Image (tube, grey):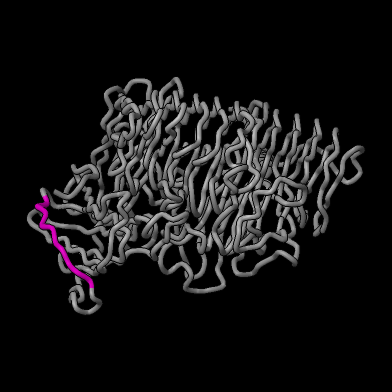
Amino acid sequence: MKIFGVGWRWSALRAFGAWVVLVVVLLAGSAWAATRVTLYPVPAEVSSSRFRVSIDGRSTDMLHAASNYYLLNFDTSGRVMVTVTAEDAHFWDAGVEVQPMRLGIRPVRHGASITFPMEGPGKLTITRPGDHFSDAVMLMLFANPEDHSGITATTPKVRYYGAGVHHENIDAHSGDTIYLAGGAVVFGSLNLWQVQDVHVLGTGTIIYDGPQNPHSDEGWMQKPNWHVLVMDEAERVEIDGITCITRSRSWQIQMKNSRHIGFYNVKAIGGNPNDANQDGMDWLGGGDTTVRNSFFRASDDDFALQGNWDGYDADVMRVPGQNVSNITIEDTIVSTSISNTVRVNWPEKTFNSAHFHMSNIDVINMGFGACKVPFALLEIWADPAGRGSQRDYRLSDIRMEDWYSLYQLRQPLPGIRDVVFDGVWAMDGPGMVASVVKGDVAGVTLKDASLQGFDGAKAHAEDGAEQPVVEQATGLSGFAYSGGLLRARKRVRFEAKAAMLEGRRFEWIFGDGTRAEGHEVEHAFADAEGTLLDGSGRFRVLLHVKDKAGQQSWTSESVVLASDVKKAATAASDAADGRVAFERVVRVPADGGYTFTLLTSRDSLLSVDDGVAVGSPTGRVQVCGAEGNAVQPVRVSAVLTAGEHRIRVRQMPGIENAEGNQPVLLWEGPGIERQVVP
C-alpha cells in the first residue's frame, strides 16, 4: 500500500505513534481533496430573498435576473450539496423539476426547502412541473470551474470591474482585455463596434434594461447601447464566463457582419412580461462563430440567422442580406418561453447560409404554439416570397424535453438542401404537432432518432418538397421492465433491448436520484411520489447507451408505481362547467402503471375510470396571426388491472388548433410504446 508515495507495511505499524501519524496523513489527504467553493457577494441592488441558496452549508441570496427569473453564479472544484429555500412555505407543493433531465436530479424536500447534489461545474434550472413559459418562476444555478487566470485589479493592461455595481456602458477597443470579476454587476451594454482582438473574461454579470417600447418591437435596431451585447464588423473576439441579462424588449446578443467569434461558458437570459423579441443570439451576416458550454434562456428564438434586419417594412425586407456561415454550437443548454430553438430566414427575406452545426445540446424548453408556422427545433422559413441557399445544417446528439415540433422547413424558391438530424431524442413527452417540409426542400435525413410519439419521423411534404429520408435507429430500441402492480420498495427488473452488447456502456437513470450500470439491472424505488415529487407515482426512467467510439443514444419510459394512499374520486358531471364529454374504452393487457396524454388546444379535463380529473394548463395564445391556442399536453398516470378501463375527456366547446388535427389521445405502459389510443 502506498499513501502519497510513501511505502507502508501494516506489520510495521505497531507503535501507537505510528497509528497517529497514519491517521493524521489520511485526514490531511481528505482535507486536501475537499471541494473548494467560492461564493461571490450579490449586491443589494439586484439581490432577492425570495429564494435563498446554501452551497455546502454556506448561504446566500439569489440575484434577481429578469421577470420571475433568479440565478446564482459560484465557483467549485467538485461535487457540492445544494439547498434552495423559498420564502413561501408552500412553493414546492405542486412538485419540483430540475433540468436537464439527463442529470437525474430529484431533490429531497423538507417544507420550503429542497436539497440535492450537484456533481461539479455545470448549469441547471429549477422550476415547478410544467412552469416553463414567460410567467414561470425559474431558478438557475451556474457552477463555474475555478478561475485560474490570475487576473486581479492590478493586472496591467486589463480593464477590471470588481465586485459591486457599476452603471456604465462598456465600449471595447481593439486589443482590449476586459475582466468582470465574480460579484461584479454592470448595468449597461457591452459594445464591440468595429474592433478586433478583444477578450471579455470573468464570471461577472451585465444587466441591460434599455429604453425600448415594451409594446412594440424596436429591439432589432443595430446600434450601440441597444442590446446587452452588440457587435458590428468585429473580428477575433472571445467572450468567456460572463452572464448577460436582458430585461427590456430587446434582442440579446446581436452580431452584424462579425467573424471569428467565440462564446465559452456564457449565460444569456432574457425575460419580460410581453414575452417577445428577445432572441438569444442573432447573426445579421457574418459567422465563423463557436458557442460552447453555454446557456440560453430567451423570450423568442434562441438562435436566429438572417442576412440583415432593418425593420418590418416590405421594401427593406426585400433587400438581400449578407451570407451567414460556419457556426458551431456544442455542449450547451437552451430554453425559450416562445418561438424556436433555431430560426433561419423570414417570409420576405433573401440571404444564403451554410455550415450550421449543433451537437450535444439539451433543449429543455421550446416555445409552444406558432407564429404562422409552428415552433420547432429547426425552422427555416422563407415562405411565401423569401429565397436563398440554406445548406449543410447538421444537428446531432440533441435531447429534447418540453418540445413542440422537430422541424418546419418551408422555402418555395431555391432552396433548402442537406439537413441532417443525427441522434435526436425525446426525453419524456411527445411533440405537439407534425413536422412539415414545403417548397424547394430536398436532402433532409433523420437517423438514430427516438421521438416516441406523435411528431415522429413522417413529415408532411407539401408543394413539391422531397419526403425526408428516415434511417431507423440501429443499436437500441428501448427497454423492458417487470410487469405487474409496482409499489415502493418492490424490486423491478430492467433490461435494455440492444442488438449488440459488447463494447457498450449502459447507464440507467431512474428518476429518483439514483443510477445503475449494466445491460440488466434491478432497482427498488423508495417511494411512489414520482420523479417530480407531484404524487403521480410516475418516474421518468432514462437509459443512456454509449459505445467505444463515443456514439450514444437515449431512451426514456414512464414507470408508474401505485401509491398506498391513493383513492379514486368521482369526476364532476358534464353540466357543472359546460364541458362536452367523450370516452374511450381501452383494454389494458396486463396489470401495471399506464400514462395517458391528451394533446389539445382547448380547455380540457382528462380522467381514468372514476379517478380525479386532471385539467389542461393555462391556454397559450399563438402569435403573428396564427389562430387559436397552442397545443399542450394533459397527462394522467394510473395503476390499472388487466381488463377494460374508461378514459374520459371533457372539453369546452370551441375550434381546435388545426395545425395538429387535435385532439389526440396517447397512452403508454408495460410493453406499450407511446401510441395513439385505439
Report the quarter where the N terminus lies. top right
Q: In which quarter of the image is residue 377?
A: top left
Q: Does the magenta stretch include residue 599?
A: no
Q: Looking at the picture, how far across and down is residue 452, in whole percent?
A: 29, 41
Q: In which quarter of the image is residue 535?
A: bottom left
In the image as oriented, which residue stretches furthest toward the left?
643
Judge whether residue 183 can be spotted in this image.
Answer: yes
Give the answer, above or below, for where 337 lies relative to 445: below
Left or right, 54 with respect to 490, comes to right
Foreground pick, 487 / 244? 244
Q: Is residue 581 magenta?
A: yes
Q: Residue at x 61, y 65 (%)?
A: 52
Q: Looking at the picture, how far across and down is residue 39, in whole percent?
A: 70, 54
Give the answer, above or below, for where 525 lies relative to 353: below
Magenta stretch in the rendered image? 579-588
Left or right, 519 with respect to 650, comes to right
Q: Which residue is drawn at 45% across and 20% down?
A: 549
Foreground pick, 562 / 9? 562
Judge whether residue 27 can be spotted in this image.
Answer: no
Q: Which residue is drawn at 23% across and 39% down?
A: 480
> Which secondary structure type mostly characterizes the magenta part of the structure?
strand
In the image as oriented, which residue stretches furthest toward the bottom?
576
Q: Looking at the picture, how far across and down is residue 503, in whole percent?
A: 38, 21
Q: Looking at the picture, how far across and down is residue 671, in whole percent?
A: 18, 42
Left or right, 490 with respect to 640, comes to right
Foreground pick, 206 / 85? 206
Q: Which residue is drawn at 51% across and 64% down?
A: 135
